[in-house]
Amino acid sequence: MTAVRILGLDPGLRITGFGVIERHGTRFAYVASGCIRSGEGTLPERLATLFRGVDELIATYRPTEAAVEKVFVNLNPQSTLLLGQARGAVLCAALLGGTAVHEYTALQVKQAVVGYGKADKVQVQEMVTRLLGLDATPGPDAADALACAICHAHQSTHPYAAQAVRRRGGRLLVPPPSRR
Amino acid sequence: MTAVRILGLDPGLRITGFGVIERHGTRFAYVASGCIRSGEGTLPERLATLFRGVDELIATYRPTEAAVEKVFVNLNPQSTLLLGQARGAVLCAALLGGTAVHEYTALQVKQAVVGYGKADKVQVQEMVTRLLGLDATPGPDAADALACAICHAHQSTHPYAAQAVRRRGGRLLVPPPSRR
């Protein structure tokens, strides 16, 4: 069975988390994780730093698929705009780097990893550590990105899972085989 | 005197307006204008189309400076997010294409072109047509982008103009020479 390499991304203007995993059938293996920091500079310079960072990750780890967390817009408009701009840079870099880009809401990601859509950051970090058999707990941004990659790996293994999340108001209900 | 070529951009997810002008000292000359349409597709695909479009404009017209209109955030959060993502793609492409990127608010652009910060789209189109001596009126998105380029050309000719706009609540007051 061929391994599929997935790049998970949790975009933010200051810090964009990343996590790379490999899916072998229904099993996952950790490859790498960390953060891209946009540093100091003008807004265009910081966005370009994020773009280049994602581009370098793709050149280094050669994922074929990318999973990006959808943004929660219930912030103040200025924060939403800044986050949107960071997302624009990250999504562009992922697609232009040649990956197939998929998007998941925080609800879908938490459902897939913790089994509970309102799980907190610590629960996500713990479950990511357990699911990938890590020796140390990744930081919150890297953990969110790894969780997003796991969510995509899970969804592409069980293609009805994400539909179920959408249909049943957040409860992950995989339909029984007879109804597929 | 060396001509400076400026790319004006008015980012939007569906349509991003562009306008290229040349500044010769204190005079401007029209080079090109139009729109990049993101077309159909997923959000990442549409953002990548905007990125590639700006990249192609830079390859074709070789501007050294870019002027991008700042976004008005007083929309609903979802619209702000979409606009932010389009801006992220456009700003990245402009900077990675090698231009020096400058940002101007709609107030600064309208002040520079119409002399009135609350000018409507038709007034901007008319003034852009007159200032650049065009035979036909450009569409609203192209006109906004040309206006942004003119604003930057004006600001880089009169470097105190933008400061004055910021200081005096929207009135374009260039300080007298003795105070510069």
Image (cartoon, coloured by chain):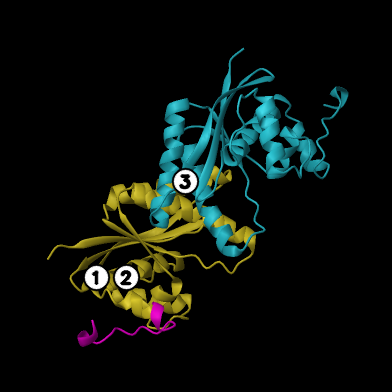
Chain colours: A yellow, B cyan
Q: Position of residue B77 (x, y in %)?
A: 59, 64
Report whether mark 2 lies on the same chain as mark 3: yes
Q: Earlier in the sequence, mark 3 or mark 1?
A: 1
Could you classify mark 3 by the number of other residues whose Cα lies within 10 Å: few (under 14), some (14-19), or many (20 or more)? Answer: many
Residue drawn at point x = 56 percent, y = 32 percent? B19
Q: Are marks 1 and 2 in contact (CB under 8 Å)?
A: yes
**Circle 1 sits on which residue?**
A28
**Circle 2 sits on which residue?**
A150
Magenta part mainly helix, strand or loop? Answer: loop
B40 left or right, relative to B173: left
Q: CA distance from mark 3 to mark 1?
A: 30 Å
Could you classify mark 1 by the number of other residues whose Cα lies within 10 Å: few (under 14), some (14-19), or many (20 or more)? Answer: many
Q: Earlier in the sequence, mark 1 or mark 2?
A: 1
Q: Residue furthest left?
A: A1
Residue A152 seen in the figure: yes
Q: Position of residue A137 (x, y in %)?
A: 38, 71
Name the disc covering residue A49, or none: 3
Q: Position of residue B165 (x, y in %)?
A: 78, 39
Residue A45 seen in the figure: no
Report whether mark 1 lies on the same chain as mark 2: yes
Q: Quadrant of the C terminus of chain B?
A: top right
Question: Is residue B75 positioned above or below A117 on the image?
Answer: above
What stretch of residues is rendered in magenta?
A166-180
Q: Residue furthest front?
A: B136
